[in-house]
Structures are given as C-alpha cells and as structure tokens.
Image: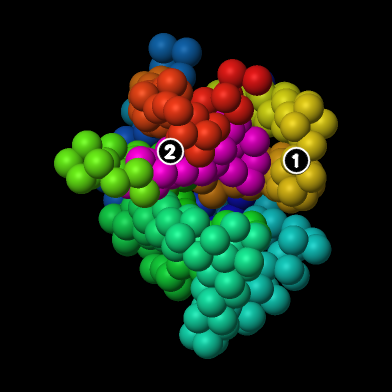
C-alpha cells in the first residue's frame, strides 16, 4: 500500500492506494467516505461539490480529477513509495516473541508455571479459580478475532502477569480493536453472572469467589490505560476523532495510571504503563500512514456505551457481595470504595 498527499482547493487530502485501488481517503486526519460507481473511479462530496478521482492511470504516474463529473485536471504523480511504518525496538521485540511463542511446549510450560506460582502465593483452589477466569477472559478475545477472520495462535498464560490472546494477523479497523478488546471482559462478565447463579443454587462459597474474582480481574482490565483492554477502547475512540485528541486522552490515561500505582502501591501497573506509553508513541508516530479505518461518530458513541455497560455489569456483581461477612467476597468492593 502506498500513501499519496493531494492538494485540492488549498485543502490537503491523504490517499492510501493499493495499486490503482483506493483503500482510504483522509482530510484533516478524518476518514472520508467515498463511492466506487465504476472500476477505478472514486467519488466523494466536499464543500458542496462532487469530486471524482480516476486511478486507472496511476501506474503511469497520472491521476485524473473530476468536479461534478467534469474533468478539471490531470495531475502528474511523483514516484510512489510504500508507506512502511518505521520499525523500532517494539517491532524487534514482537518478532522475537513471535518466534518464542511458536512452540506448543512453551504454552504448556507457562500454564503450569502460572498454576504453580499462584498456588505457592495463595492456594491451589485460588490458583485454579484465577486460571479459569483468565482462560475465559482470553477466550473471549480469541472468539472475537475468529469472528473477524483473524487467525490466532491461541492463549498464553504469563505467570504473575495474566494471560495473552495471540493473533497471527493484523486488525484493519478501529471497530475490530474495540470489539476484540471488550469481548474478553464481556466473557468474564458471563463467568461472574454464572458464578452468582451457581452460588445461590448450591450455596457453595467457591462459586461466589469465582464471581467476584472474575469481576475484579476484568474491571482491572477495563481501566482506561494502555495496554489494558480499556486502554485499547479509549485509544480507538479518541484516535478516531483526531490524532491530537487521541494522544491527549491516552496521555491522561497514563497519568491516571501513575496516580493509581502510587496510591495503591501497584508496581506491576508501572510496567504496564511503560509498555502502554511506548504504544502511544508508536501510534502517534504512525498516525499519517495508519491502515486502521477509524470509527465514525455513531461507532464512537456505540463503543463508549458498550464499554460502560460491561463496566457496570462487573461493578454490579461486586456490589452484590459488598455487605458479605466473608472478607474475600467483600474485598473487591472495599478496594473500589477506598
């Protein structure tokens, strides 16, 4: 895919082309919807005019421009270059991790280490509950990826960190990022509700423990901090508005995370914030050649509502046990009320 900057009526447009096919069109960092009435002819409305772009001669370094179906000019194009994002340390680390995760034995070893580690810190019962919650959460991400036709490598459990659903393909739209990010906590909400139902059906406290543990785990993931799931939703919504809005909002998320880390002494969260800050930097640097199709206004609002509903569901589960005499069941709500 190549990136082309075009000036029309003193306005700058950014075209993303795949050969002679127009993939995306941007104006002031906002995606513009366009029609394709004929092969290699693309039309869109701008300032009351119907603009047409004929890309049939792009390979000859020529682009024909129409206004209200009348040809007005034929531009000579410069040498088109591939819009490749710059590769940095994160790219090298991702490549190294991709090679590392290829062995199935590593996946099994990580799962075993996770169970052993949590059992050593707490108990085998707690370890199994936590692993179950993590697996269901990551399975939600995997199901969403498969829904969009994205190949997956499976679920990896990282001792003392959590889990990771690994994809083999890249997402192409901000909407995919929102849905994939929210499906983990959404599946976790199903686990929490099921735990509540089984608790009242059997009166076994372990099911209530699963419910509140799943709610607390998923609510943490919904914090608006990159690289957590809530941070990805926030990034997709804010960067769909304007790049500078996305940068500002994500940086506010980092500051919020730092305050949270300092207040509760969450040193592991500092590590997440460091990774998230790097992601923000690379997102900002690649804003002009991003292949991700942004959310429209409706998509931004719908994504925000979905996020709020999932958050409210987990808070409701935790509030349900807030007055419990069990210190374990009431602990999550005490943390939120602190």
Residue 201 higher or lower than 90, as above or below: above
Q: Secondary structure at mark 1?
A: loop
* Frontmost residue, 278 versus 67: 278
Residue, disc 2:
212
Q: Is residue 25 visible?
A: no
Residue 17 higher or lower than 164, as above or below: above
Q: Residue furthest front?
A: 325
Q: Residue at x 52, y 73 (%)?
A: 111
Q: CA distance from mark 2 to mark 1?
A: 20 Å
Q: Earlier in the sequence, mark 2 or mark 1?
A: 2
Residue, disc 1:
266
Q: Residues within 10 Å of mark 2 (few under 14, many from 20)?
A: many
- Quadrant housing the N terminus: bottom right
Between circles 2 and 1, the one closer to the viewer is: 2
Q: Tell me residue 179's x, y (percent).
A: 39, 42
Q: Residue at x 70, y 76 (%)?
A: 96
């Amino acid at each position: 895919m190549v990136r082309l900057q075009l000036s029309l009526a003193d306005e700058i447009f950014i075209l993303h082309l795949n050969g002679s096919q127009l993939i995306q069109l941007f104006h002031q960092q906002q995606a513009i919807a366009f029609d394709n009435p004929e092969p290699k002819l693309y039309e869109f409305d701008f300032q009351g005019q119907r603009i047409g772009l004929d890309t049939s001669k792009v390979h000859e370094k020529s682009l024909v421009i129409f206004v209200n179906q009348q040809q007005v000019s034929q531009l000579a194009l410069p040498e088109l270059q591939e819009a490749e994002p710059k590769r940095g340390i994160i790219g090298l680390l991702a490549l190294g991790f991709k090679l590392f995760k290829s062995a199935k034995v590593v996946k099994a070893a990580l799962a075993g280490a996770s169970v052993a580690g949590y059992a050593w810190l707490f108990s085998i019962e707690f370890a199994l509950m936590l692993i179950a919650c993590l697996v269901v959460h990551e399975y939600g991400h995997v199901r969403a990826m498969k829904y969009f036709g994205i190949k997956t490598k499976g679920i990896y459990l990282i001792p003392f960190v959590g889990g990771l659903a690994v994809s083999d393909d890249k997402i192409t739209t901000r909407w995919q990022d929102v849905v994939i990010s929210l499906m983990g906590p959404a599946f976790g909400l199903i686990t929490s509700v099921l735990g509540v139902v089984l608790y009242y059906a059997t009166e076994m406290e372990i099911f209530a423990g699963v419910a509140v543990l799943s709610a607390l785990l998923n609510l943490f993931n919904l914090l608006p901090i990159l690289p957590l799931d809530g941070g990805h939703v926030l990034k997709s919504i804010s960067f769909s508005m304007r790049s500078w809005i996305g940068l500002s909002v994500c940086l506010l998320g980092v500051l919020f995370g730092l305050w949270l880390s300092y207040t509760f002494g969450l040193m592991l969260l500092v590590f997440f914030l460091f990774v998230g800050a790097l992601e923000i930097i690379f997102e900002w640097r690649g804003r002009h050649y991003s292949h991700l199709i942004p959310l429209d206004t409706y998509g931004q609002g719908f994504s925000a509502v979905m996020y709020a509903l999932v958050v409210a569901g987990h808070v409701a589960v935790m509030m349900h046990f807030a007055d419990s005499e069990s210190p374990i069941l009431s602990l999550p709500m005490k943390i939120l009320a602190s």
